[in-house]
Amino acid sequence: MPGKYGYESLKGFMSLMTGDEKHSDAATSTLDVLWTLYDRILTVDAIDPTAPERDRFYLSKGHGPMAYYAVLTAKGFLTPTDLEGFGTYDSILGHHPDRLRVPGVEISSGSLGHGLALAVGAAIGLGIDQSAGRVFCLLGDGELDEGSNHEAIALAGRLGLSRLTAIVIDNNSSMLGWPGGIEKRFEVEGWTSAVVDGRDHDEIERGIVDSHQGSPHVVVAHIGTGA
């Protein structure tokens, strides 16, 4: 979607937010995927953020949302002035995003392991209305240690939720090993998959828009260790 600012503005916007530096790596890890989604893929409108036909984006990886707020600012949902009050008592921007306070935010997140199940529910509900949009959910690889995600993965595959795309930021922080890669956990449940460089916008876009008729789709975005 068009916006007032370009990609080069994002780090400056992130620098306006202080007080949650312990999650700066978690925030930075999502920056390029978030930008690609909002700049090239999502059908959303800052003027009418609740339009029924919009795409839904669920940030399950809700720790360190500075990158999310920066992208929302670049796309006109927030202003740079909003960022300056980040985390303060009167600010709409908390250390976890709040859907009741932040324009464009679909779910309140931060408690890891919940977002994908919510996205599955949304995809089921939206499937009743063929004019409604798609559902995208961004997760961290560590979240996949939560049992709720395994149930969501299995249900989405069983129901063939082609309206649903999950993007997993893989920075090797999962406590469990994934033989064959994270994508295999999804594939055995009937998902299609793509593996991309999580810093390459063109590659991210290609991975997300891969055709997946009749099934949900997962994109595993590798960014390296600890970022």
Image: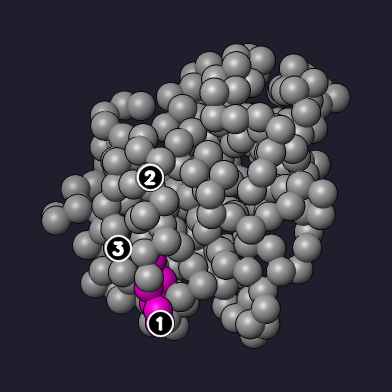
Q: What colouring method underlies this structural image?
A: one colour
Instruction: Specify few, some or many for label 1: CA neighbours under 10 Å numbering under 14, 14-19, or 20 or more.
Output: some
First in sequence: mark 3 vs mark 1: 3
Instruction: Specify few, some or many for label 2: CA neighbours under 10 Å numbering under 14, 14-19, or 20 or more.
Output: few
Q: Nearer the viewer, mark 3 or mark 2?
A: 2
Q: What element carries label 3?
A: strand
Q: Are marks 3 and 2 in contact (CB under 8 Å)?
A: no
Residue picked out by circle 2: 202
Instruction: Specify few, some or many for label 3: CA neighbours under 10 Å numbering under 14, 14-19, or 20 or more.
Output: many
Range drawn in magenta: 212-217
Across and down, in percent, residue 10 comes to: 57, 25
Q: Do the residues labelled 1 and 2 touch (CB within 8 Å)?
A: no
Magenta span includes 184: no
The residue lying furthest to the right in this view is: 90
Q: Can residue 175 be seen in this view?
A: yes
The residue lying furthest to the left in this view is: 179
Q: Which residue is drawn at 22% across and 62% down?
A: 184
Q: What residue type is labelled 1?
A: Gly
Q: Nearer the viewer, mark 1 or mark 2?
A: 2
Q: Can residue 125 be seen in this view?
A: no
Across and down, in percent, residue 181 comes to: 19, 53
Magenta span includes 216: yes
Residue picked out by circle 3: 193
Q: Is mark 2 on a helix, strand or loop?
A: helix
Q: Which residue is drawn at 72% across and 48% down?
A: 104
Q: Which amino acid does label 3 sit on?
A: Ser
The answer to whether residue 44 is left or right of residue 66 is right
Is 138 above or below relative to 157?
A: above
Residue picked out by circle 1: 214
Quadrant including the C terminus:
top left
First in sequence: mark 1 vs mark 2: 2
